[in-house]
Image (tube, coloured by chain):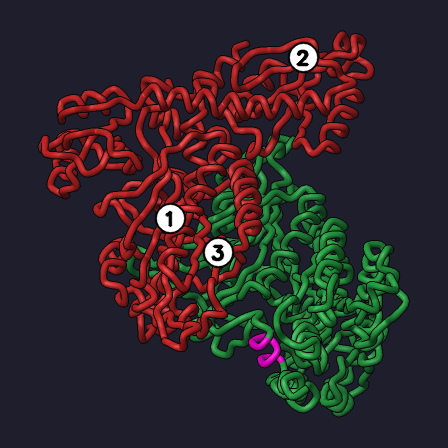
Chain colours: A green, B red
Amino acid sequence: MAKNEQFVEQIADIEADFPRWYTDVVVKTKLVDYGPVKGTMVIRPYGYAIWENIRRELDGRFREAGVENAYFPLLIPMSFMTKEAEHVEGFAPEVAVVTHAGGAKLEEPLVVRPTSETIIGHMYGKWVESWRDLPLRQNQWCNVMRWEKTTRPFLRTSEFLWQEGHSVFASEEEAERETLSMLALYREFARTVLCMPVLTGKKTEKEKFAGAVATYGMEAMMHDGKSLQSGTTHYMGQNFAKAFGVQFTDKDGALKYGYTMSYGVSTRLIGALIMTHGDQRGLVLPPPVAPVQVVIVPIAAKKAGVLEACGALKERLLAAGIRTKIDDSDNSPGWKFNEWEMKGVPVRIELGPRDIEAGKMTVFRRDTCEKEDGYLLSEAEEAVKELLGKICAELYARAERRMRERIVPAAGLDELLAGVNGGNFVRAGWCGERACEDRVKEFAQATARVMDDTNDMPVCVCCGKRAKHTVFFARAY
Amino acid sequence: MAKNEQFVEQIADIEADFPRWYTDVVVKTKLVDYGPVKGTMVIRPYGYAIWENIRRELDGRFREAGVENAYFPLLIPMSFMTKEAEHVEGFAPEVAVVTHAGGAKLEEPLVVRPTSETIIGHMYGKWVESWRDLPLRQNQWCNVMRWEKTTRPFLRTSEFLWQEGHSVFASEEEAERETLSMLALYREFARTVLCMPVLTGKKTEKEKFAGAVATYGMEAMMHDGKSLQSGTTHYMGQNFAKAFGVQFTDKDGALKYGYTMSYGVSTRLIGALIMTHGDQRGLVLPPPVAPVQVVIVPIAAKKAGVLEACGALKERLLAAGIRTKIDDSDNSPGWKFNEWEMKGVPVRIELGPRDIEAGKMTVFRRDTCEKEDGYLLSEAEEAVKELLGKICAELYARAERRMRERIVPAAGLDELLAGVNGGNFVRAGWCGERACEDRVKEFAQATARVMDDTNDMPVCVCCGKRAKHTVFFARAY
C-alpha cells in the first residue's frame, strides 16, 4: 500500500492549504502544466477533454437558441480600443501588443484581443443595414489574452480559451431580454452540466464590464468559501453601436443605432468545478464533463476470463454512450484505485472472478467514496446510466446545500468581516454609494459579487443609511 | 427573372477571370469578409460551419487513430525559434512579434505562433522521461499567424485556423511510419469528405518544411489547373528533439533522443474545395461539409397545406440526420433557386400543391444542375441520403477524371512550359539538382509539387541527365 499512500500524501491538505491543494491537483492529475512564458498554461489532454465537453454542451444550447458561430481576427488595431472611452480605460493596462510583423515595424500597433466587442462592432457596422438584418447573433470560440500580474492555472492566465457571444438588436428591450436569457442559460448549464450551484444577478457599477451599461454575473462558491466569477453577460446599450457605427434603417425609414450585448464563459469553468467538488483525494468530476465516466479495474486480471469480461463490459458501456476505460496496466488494483480517484472518475467498476461468476459487479462512487454491491452485470448499461444521473443530482444538491448554509446576513461591517473570515458569502444591504463599496473592500477584503433581485435588507452594512440594494459580498478569486 | 439574372451577373466569369470569380464567390456567399487589419479575414457563419464540419470529421479520425487533443500557448519566446537553425530561417521573416504587454516592454520579445514545433518540443522535453511515455501523440486546433505580403481569403491569410499534430516516437521507423500514415489519413479524408482527389508524395529539399528531414504533401488541382498545397506531414528526425531535449531512458537503460513528426491542415481546405468543385453559378459544396445539405423551396407557398408539407418534410429529414432548411422568405422561387445554387447547397427540393397531391417531390442536384422527377415523398429520407452519397461519389469522380486528364508528361522545358500554360500538372523526370529545380521555376513559373513514388521518366526535364525522381510540376497557389 506504500505506493497508494504516496499519492494521497502528494496532495496538500485541502483544509489547511487550499491554494496549494488546488495547484497540486491540477498539475498532478495532468489537467494542466505551466507554459514557458510567465502566466501561460498548457492544457493537457485530460484537461482539454473537459473543455471539449463543456464546449459541446454549451455550443448545443447556443445553437438551439439560434446563435451562429463565426471567427473574428485575433489582432485588433489599437485605434479600435480607444473608440469606446470606458472600454480602453478598462482593458489598456492588460493588453499584449504586436508592434512588429513580417520583419518590419507596424504603422499602427495591434492588440491581441482581450475581448472582441470592438472588432466585432466594426464588422457588425459593415453588415447591418436594415431592420431585416436584425437581430444579429453570433458567437466565437477562441483564445484571448489579458496580461495579469498574478496568475493561476484556469483561474487567471494571460491566455485563456473562451466563448464570446455578441448580438445586436433593434430595440433596448430585446437586447436587455437577451442579456438576461443568456444569464439564465449559463445558470441552467452550470446546474445540469457542471452540477454547480450559482448566484446570478446584476453587478455594481464598480464591478461592471468596461463599456457596458449593465453587467450580470454568475458567481459560484468555492471550497474555501471564496467566490469565483464564472460567467458574465453585458448589456451595452448603444455605447458600442455608436462607437462603431452599427446603424440600421428601421421600418419607419429612420436611421437608428442598434443595441448590443455580449456574454462569455471561459476555461475558468474548469477551475470552478474543481474547487466546487474536489476533496482530499483529488478531483471529483461531474459526469457530464468527465473525460472518463467509468473506469473498469480488473481484479485478479491474470485469472482466465477476467480481462475478456472487462473488455466485453467496456464495449457494452461504450455502445450505450458512456465514456469508459479499462485500466489493464501492470499496477496493483490499490494503486489504480488511488490514481483514478485522484483523477476524479465518477464511477469505478471492479470486476474479478467471483463477480463474474455471480454475474455481479462492485461499483465505487467517487462522490461518496463508497462501494455499492448488488449491481447485476446483465443490467450494467441501465444501472450505470442511472447512477451517473444520480451522482449528478447529488453533487449539485450537496454543493447547493453547502452554499445555502454559508450565506450569512450582516447588519454591520464587523459582522460582514466575521462572515467572510468564516468562509461565507455575506448577504447585506447597501446604500448604492461607491464609497461604501470601497470601504467594505478595504475593511474586509470583500467585494460586491452580485445584487439580489429582492431588496429586503433595510440598511447599508457600511453607512447605516437606507439600503437601495441587497448585495452578496464575498472574497473572490 | 431580372433579379435572378442579376445574381449570376454579379459573379465574374469563371473561365475568363478565375481569381475574381473566387473572391466574388467567397464574399457574396458570405463565407468570409475582410478584417480591418490587412491580410486578415473574418470567417462568417456560413464559412465557419464548413470548418466545423471539416474539424468534426478530421477530429474523429485522429481520435480513432489514438491521438489526443491539447492546447499549447499562443506566444512563444523568441529564443525558442532560434534553437533549430533551419526553422528560424524559414519562419523569422513572417512572424508577428509581441514586444509590449501589461503596459511595459517585455524583457524578451514573444512570437505569435506560426506553428508550434518549438513550444511543443519544449513541453515534450519536460514530459518525456522513459520509453513508457512513448509514443506521445497530441494534436491542437488553434489559430496561427504568418505575415504574408499577398493574401487571399482562406488561401493565404496572416491569421488562419488549423490543426497541428505533433508526435514523438522511440524509433525512426515508427516516426516515419506515422508521417506516411497521417498523409494517408489526409488523402482518405480529402476523398470521402471533401470529394477532392489529391496527389500525395514527398516534397523536394527546396519545398520542405523549415527544420524537417522530409516533408510530404497533398496537392489538389484547382479549376484553373494550378495546384493548391492542401496538407503536409513532416518527419523531423531528431532535429527538434535535440533542440529541445526530448530524451528518454530506453529499455536498455540508455538515454536517447526521440524522433518527432508533425502534420497539419488549415482553413485553406475551404479554398481548396471551392476551387475544385465551384462553377459559374457559384459554390458546389460536397455534402459531407455543406452547412445546409437540403433546401426546401415551397412552390405556391400560400396555397393551403404547402408550408405544412414543407415543414413536415424538413422535420423528417432532420430526424434522419440530414442538415435541412426551408426557405420560406418572401422572395420568388426563382430568386431562391439562384440564391441557394450560388451558396452551393447540394440538393434542392421543390414542393408545391401538385407535388403534394401526387405524393412526389421535385429534386434539383446542384452538381449536375439538373432536375430529377419521380421521387416519392413517402421515401424522402432514404432517397435523399442515397442521392447525397451519389453526389459525393460523382463529384469525386468528375474531379478525379479532370485531374487525370490534365496531368501531361514533358521531356523538356518547352513542353513543360506549354503544359503548365495549358492549365496542366506536368509529370517529368528530375535529376535531383537544386539548379534544375530553380531553372524550371524561372522558365515556367512552376514548382515541384510532389515526387511520384515511381521513377519512370528517364531523363531530367531541365538538364537531360539521368533522372533520379519523377516530379509533378505545376504553378501553385
Residue that numbered label 1 is attached to? B233
Looking at marks 2 and 3 on the same chain, the residue that comes earlier in the sequence is marked by 3
Nearer to us of marks 2 and 3 is: 3
Residue at mark 2 to residue at mark 3: CA–CA distance: 44 Å
- Secondary structure of the residue carrying tag 2 is strand
Q: Magenta stretch: dominant SS?
A: helix
Tell me which chain the residue with mark 3 is part of.
Answer: B
Residue that numbered label 2 is attached to? B362
Residue depicted at 30% across the width and 67% down the height:
B78
Q: Nearer the viewer, residue B244 or A372?
A: A372
Nearer to us of marks 1 and 2 is: 1
Q: Are marks 2 and 3 on the same chain?
A: yes
Q: Amino acid at mark 3?
A: Asn
- Secondary structure of the residue carrying tag 3 is strand
x, y percent for residue B246:
37, 70
Residue that numbered label 3 is attached to? B139
**Pointer 2 local density, CA inside 10 Å: few below 14, some 14–19, many at least 20:** some
The correct choice, above or below, for A296 with respect to B61 in the image is: below
Quadrant showing the N terminus of chain A:
bottom right
Looking at marks 1 and 3 on the same chain, the residue that comes earlier in the sequence is marked by 3
Looking at marks 1 and 2 on the same chain, the residue that comes earlier in the sequence is marked by 1
- Secondary structure of the residue carrying tag 1 is strand
Query: Which region is colored magenta?
Result: A22-28
Q: Quadrant of residue B406?
A: top left
Q: Nearer the viewer, residue A367 or A338?
A: A338
Residue B434 belongs to magenta span: no
